[in-house]
Image (spheres, rainbow, N blue to C red):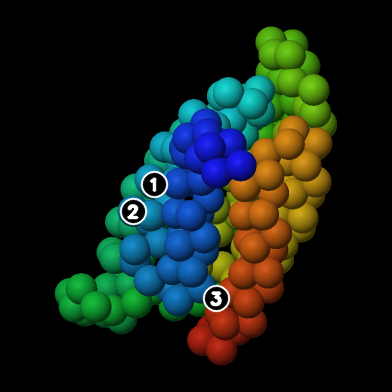
Amino acid sequence: MTEIFLNWINNNIVELLGAALGILYIFFSIKQNIFTWPTGLLTSLLYIIVFFRSGFYADMGLQFYYVFISIYGWYYWLKGGRQAAGTDNAKSELPVKRVPRKVMLKLAVIFILIYVAILFILLKFTDSTVPFMDTLTTALSIIATWMLAKKYIEHWLIWIFVDIVSAGLYVYKSLWPTVILFIIYTILAVAGYREWKKSLILTR
């Protein structure tokens, strides 16, 4: 029994490491800690491998985007925080805020365009078994991660929905460590929304 368990760990070590770092990434996000971004960067690199092996091509492509947005978010949280405070103090934090209505409308249009583009690619060029739902979670995740970089509180609401849907998809693919991860993600997203509300700056 022990040997079977050890073999399972060995065969799923990349996914397990990615799941562990993913939980740490969300924890840092809730605390608005700058380590959110390097942790997210490492998580994404590991999940590129996991999703490639499982045939989640849209999610695999999303991880490449996460690598880029992790670098951007890392920079913006540092630079944006100093600009918001009107100082060069590296400890100044970027404030939490709501998405302005004009930005929300633009994001809705961008989401539709991303959804159509990704769905076309999956249907035309891949053997994805869940193209519509894979595209939905991928497009929403792209939007939500950009919102996280800008510290818009509504990104947590998007993640709650995405995490619940994703957990169902990973059950279908038998990616059990990732199923557990996304259930934890859902709980942490709710906690994150509540935590960020404490330091929310209202915008119009």
* Disc 3, SS: strand
- Seen from the viewer's position, the closer of residues 44 and 91 is 44
Name the N-terminal-most of marks 2 and 3: 2
Displayed quadrant of residue 204: bottom right
Q: Of 170 and 30, which appears nearest the observer?
A: 170
The answer to which of marks 1 and 3 sits earlier in the sequence is 1
Residue at the image position 27 percent from the left and 73 percent from the top: 82
Residue 97: image tag: 3
Quarter of image, res 202: bottom right
Can you give x and y, in whole percent of width and height, for residue 54 in the image? Answer: 64, 26
For label 2, count other residues whose C-alpha is less than 10 Å away and answer few (under 14), some (14-19) or many (20+): some
Is residue 62 something that shows in the picture?
no
Residue tagged 1: 41
Outermost residue on the top side: it is: 125
Q: Amino acid at mark 2?
A: Pro
Residue bearing mark 2: 38
Instruction: Give, as a three-letter code, the residue at label 3.
Output: Lys
For this view, does 53 lie left or right of residue 124? left
Pointer 1 and pointer 2: residues touching (CB < 8 Å)?
A: yes
Q: Nearer the viewer, mark 2 or mark 3?
A: 2
Residue at left 51%, top 73%? Answer: 30
Measured as percent of width and height from the top left, residue 61 is found at 55, 29
Disc 1: CA contacts within 10 A as few (<14), some (14-19) or many (>=20): many
- What is the C-alpha distance between the residues marked 2 and 3? 23 Å
Tell me whether the residue at label 1 lies in contact with that at label 3, contact meaning CB atoms closer than 8 angstroms. no
